[in-house]
Image (tube, grey):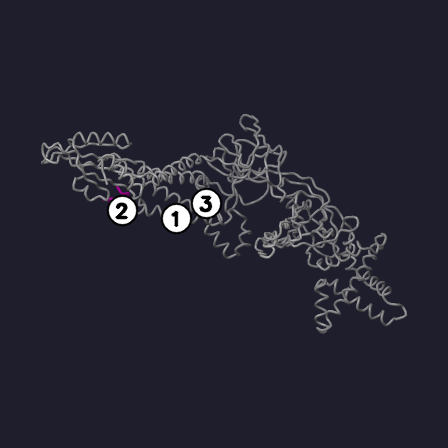
């Protein structure tokens, strides 16, 4: 029996209806739907699902982000077209199975013993011989031998002109046909399980029970009932975030246009969150010690949830998904960066915000939104850190040097070090525009012995952080640099610093040279300090030299201006300490290193978009665990489908269906001799079939080559 790829052909109804039924129940339609499902699954795997729309805009641009969103490519597995295709695949495959199963079962019961003896001679595997026994005795003997070898045998007597002949029909490997039923039934079961565990039930409630996604903000307790799903919801999959020392009983189901809240029949209390790290800073283990509070009985059940080791309660599985900040409290010191003004402290909690009044430089009031705290930051501080972290870089020579050569060679491995806590926040202005910042709490040694504070910023989440490196002073803080930065914007202090520098550099007996040096120093310092509407830093000095100095003299002029600039900034730093009532900095190597780094940092200060620096001074770390809670009744159906699929595929691939016929008839009436004609049919022509037929010839017919 050959499985047909055509569908059910109705004899009644309109032509369009009969064509639709035939197409829907045909195997070619099922294969087409399965191909579309596979392509959609590839898209859903490659493209991150259920991300904020802004992330897609940054990645693909506004136009294509809108196009992809309209096609529901950002939530493929819950898209209406995906579920519709899945439903059609279930119906089509079910019809294919229903159409072919009766034929397959009828074929399994049939021995096809009515085949004509002349047809046996047309088979590829055939043999003829004569036996010294009657046809009936030969038939029963051969039938017994085949039955002992695992064949199912049926004997049929036939009257012929020479006497009674016997047709022996045998079959083996019937599981091959059952594999077709099992494999195609498995597809139906897996798709049904996917529909049960998908968003189909939730979408049905949104369509028929007036449930709508919630698009606003605020407290979960204030969300109206039309955005909540009942505890009796038969299937769902959502996220539940619980901070240490708190409990929660409401899961969040993300939708393309908002969220739905799923009420749970229990509350999850997080007693302790445990996290361990690799040397690279990646999490090695995170687990949660929880207590499950039953709402109905008040019973408390303790459990530990780890990755790949979920907890289960009342048919709901609790998986360890990730971890987050649970509302850590942060304390910052706000220090003006460019203008005068007193420093002050500000406190907040991750997820909250604090207003900061307008600054002395005239900038508008800003709002600080505290977005995160990382207690551990493991970074690669090796000399070849760029080569180690940039996977796009290919340095063949260094690779060969590391692999070949003398036995004492070794690779320059990564130098991984925890550089301490960091806090991230956003500064949002009155117009609603925000920039993201990430500041490290402690100064970092970048490998050359110089300690610097790293102040990062970026305009959008799609960009990497760019860092302002502020050198640490002798006390391990950034007060020295901030005093110098504010002094640079004070015209009177700049003039006094220039005067002191000129007085030390030029003899008072040469007023003309002093006047010339003073003018050059004022010009260099003014260019370096810049104005709100002109460039500043070393780039401004470079632009001035290129515009006003001949090319042949630029190198010499640049060296002179940089030497003057360094000297004036040193005097400015000493002057700022004097104004603060501090002792002058000693003229040693440490001061020289500090001033070198300070000049570079001052050159970058105009690019820093905030008028002040937020220095993390203290924090209280509160961790939260993110669980995925799921009620998945289709899981058992999917497991059954997977088992059937494995059995079906193995049956179709590794079980060969074979049918054997032996026609036995007298050579002459009353001669006692029997003529035997044997033929073998298999569903696949293989070398195993050839060897088996040779074995059957020798065993049954005593065949000799």
Most foreground residue, 318 or 396: 396
Q: Pick whichever of labels 1 and 2 is earlier in the sequence.
A: 2
* Residue topped by disc 2: 18
238 on left or right of 499: left
Q: Which callout, 2 or 3, points to the residue nearer the camera?
A: 3
Magenta stretch in the rendered image = 1-20
Under circle 1, the secondary element is helix
Please tell me the numbered disc located at residue 35. Answer: 1
What is the quadrant of residue 1 in the picture? top left
* Residue topped by disc 3: 77
| Label 2, label 3: how far apart the Cα atoms are | 32 Å
Under circle 3, the secondary element is helix
Query: Residue 590: percent from the left, percent from the top?
Result: 79, 53
Magenta region's main secondary structure? Answer: loop
Please tell me the numbered disc located at residue 446. Answer: none
| Label 1, label 2: how far apart the Cα atoms are | 24 Å
């Amino acid at each position: 029996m050959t499985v047909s790829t055509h569908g059910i052909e109705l004899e009644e109804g309109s032509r369009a209806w009969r064509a639709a039924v035939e197409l829907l129940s045909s195997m070619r339609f099922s294969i087409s739907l399965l191909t579309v499902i596979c392509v959609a699954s590839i898209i859903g795997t490659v493209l991150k699902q259920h991300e904020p729309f802004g992330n897609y805009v940054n990645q693909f641009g506004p136009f294509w982000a809108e196009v992809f969103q309209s096609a529901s490519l950002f939530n493929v597995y819950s898209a209406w077209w995906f579920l519709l295709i899945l439903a059609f695949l279930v119906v089509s495959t079910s019809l294919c199975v229903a159409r072919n199963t009766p034929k397959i079962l009828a074929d399994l019961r049939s021995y096809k013993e009515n085949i004509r003896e002349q047809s046996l001679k047309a088979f590829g595997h055939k043999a003829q011989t004569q036996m010294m026994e009657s046809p009936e005795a030969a038939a029963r003997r051969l039938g017994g031998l085949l039955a002992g070898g695992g064949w199912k045998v049926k004997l049929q007597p036939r009257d012929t002109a020479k006497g009674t002949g016997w047709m022996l029909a045998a079959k083996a490997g019937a599981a091959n046909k059952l594999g077709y039923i099992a494999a195609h039934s498995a597809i139906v079961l897996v798709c049904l399980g996917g529909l049960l565990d998908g968003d189909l039930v939730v979408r049905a409630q949104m369509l028929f029970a007036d449930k709508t996604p919630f698009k606003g903000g605020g407290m979960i307790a204030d969300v109206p009932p039309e955005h909540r799903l009942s505890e009796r919801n038969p299937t769902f999959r959502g996220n539940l975030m619980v901070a240490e020392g708190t409990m929660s009983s409401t899961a969040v189901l993300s939708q393309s246009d908002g969220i739905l809240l799923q009420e749970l029949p229990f509350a999850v209390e997080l007693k302790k969150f445990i996290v361990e790290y690799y040397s690279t800073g990646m999490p090695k283990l995170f687990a949660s010690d929880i207590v499950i509070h039953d709402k109905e009985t008040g019973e408390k059940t303790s459990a530990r949830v780890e990755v790949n080791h979920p907890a289960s309660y009342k048919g709901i599985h609790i998986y360890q998904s990730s971890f987050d900040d649970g509302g850590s409290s942060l304390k910052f010191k706000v220090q003006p960066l460019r203008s005068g003004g007193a420093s002050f402290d500000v406190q907040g909690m991750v997820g909250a915000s604090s207003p900061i009044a307008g600054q002395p430089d005239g900038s508008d009031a800003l709002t600080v939104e505290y977005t995160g705290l990382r207690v551990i930051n493991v970074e690669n501080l090796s000399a070849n850190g760029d080569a180690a972290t940039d996977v796009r870089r290919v340095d063949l020579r260094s690779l060969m040097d590391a692999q070949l050569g003398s036995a004492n060679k070794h690779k320059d491995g990564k130098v991984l070090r925890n550089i301490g806590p960091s806090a991230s926040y956003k500064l949002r202005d009155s117009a609603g525009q925000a920039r993201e910042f990430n500041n490290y709490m402690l100064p970092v040694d970048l490998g050359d012995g110089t300690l610097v504070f790293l102040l990062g910023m970026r305009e959008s989440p799609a960009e990497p952080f760019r860092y302002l490196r502020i050198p640490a002073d002798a006390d391990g803080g950034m007060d020295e640099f901030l005093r110098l930065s504010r002094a640079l914007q004070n015209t009177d202090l700049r003039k006094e610093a220039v005067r002191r520098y000129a007085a030390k550099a030029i003899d008072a007996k040469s007023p003309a040279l002093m006047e010339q040096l003073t003018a050059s120093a004022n010009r260099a310092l003014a260019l370096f300090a810049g104005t709100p509407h002109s460039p500043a830093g070393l780039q401004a000095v470079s632009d001035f030299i290129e515009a006003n100095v001949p090319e042949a003299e630029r190198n010499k002029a640049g060296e002179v201006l940089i030497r003057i600039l360094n000297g004036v900034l040193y005097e400015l730093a000493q002057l700022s300490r004097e104004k603060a009532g501090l002792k002058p900095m000693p003229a040693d190597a440490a001061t020289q290193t500090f001033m070198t780094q300070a000049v570079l940092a001052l050159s970058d200060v105009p690019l820093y978009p905030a008028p002040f620096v937020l220095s993390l001074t203290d924090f209280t770390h509160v961790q939260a665990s993110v669980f995925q809670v799921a009620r998945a009744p289709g899981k058992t159906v999917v497991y059954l489908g997977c088992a059937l699929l494995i059995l079906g595929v193995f049956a179709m691939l590794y079980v060969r269906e074979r049918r054997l016929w032996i026609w036995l008839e007298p050579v002459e009436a009353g001669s006692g001799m029997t003529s035997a004609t044997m033929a073998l049919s298999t569903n696949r022509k293989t070398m195993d079939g050839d060897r088996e037929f040779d074995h059957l010839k020798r065993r049954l017919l005593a065949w000799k080559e």
